Amino acid sequence: RSPGAMKQLTGFSFAERGNKSRSTLQLTGKHPFTQYMTSGKEEFNPNPLFYVLPDKDTTVLGTLNGSPVLAVRKNGCGTQVFSMLPPSAELIRGICRAAGIHLYSTRGDVVRANANLVMIHASSSGLKKIDLPWSGKIREIITDKIFPSGKITISMTSGETALFIPVQPQK
């Protein structure tokens, strides 16, 4: 619980204070890392509250009761992200997209994929879109429906799972 040790580990400077009230994360502006996030979505009550003391190299992405709890900084070693709060799927998705990591879906469904199989498990009902990193035809193995472009759009109900394989195996 040492702000000094935290700085040594992360490169961010920190302060600590007690926190007795529940509050919501407030985003401070637009940033690629927070592009999928919404302010005020979930309540938190971290106690103690460690928050970032921003310097010239730090960009504050979000605050909790006015204290910077989500921040990013770049240096010669790369990019560091600090979140006092558990990182949401939306935050991880934004970081991955900004880093150039392929995203199969941005909806929160469970997607597992490799060169020979794509699986989606619907976390909610509705239209699902999967963007594959290849452009060949793909087949849904239960219905035999062919999707021609490497992009899958399928209507699913919550809890449903669909499996897809390339029509021609990927190399």
Image (cartoon, helix red, strand yellow):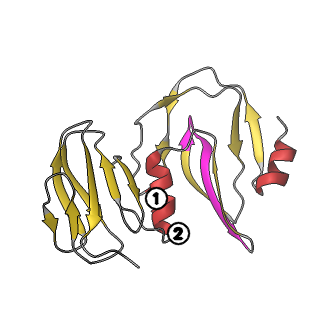
Residue at the disc numbered 1: 94
Q: Does residue 106 show up?
A: no
* On screen, residue 60 above or below 24: below
In the image: residue 88, left or right of residue 137:
right
User: Callout 1: few (<14), some (14-19), or many (20+) C-alpha neighbours within 10 Å?
Assistant: many
Q: Identify the image quadrant of residue 41.
A: top left
Residue at (20, 64) in percent of width and height: 139
Chain-order first, disc 2 or disc 1:
1
User: Would you call the spot at circle 2 few (<14 residues within 10 Å), some (14-19), or many (20 or more)?
Assistant: few
Say which residue appears at 18% left-offset and 59% top-offset. 153
Q: Report the residue at 75% width, 35% height from top.
A: 16
Q: Residue 63: x percent and y percent?
A: 56, 43
- Which residue matches tag 2? 99
Q: Which residues are magenta?
A: 63-75
Q: Residue at x 82, y 42 (%)?
A: 3
Q: Main secondary structure of the magenta part?
A: strand
Spot occupied by residue 39 in the image (x, y as percentages of width and height): 41, 42
Q: Nearer the viewer, residue 125 or 56?
A: 125
**71 in magenta:** yes
Mark 2–mark 1 Cα distance, whole angstroms, equals: 9 Å
- 4 relative position to 128: left or right: right
Q: Secondary structure at mark 2?
A: loop
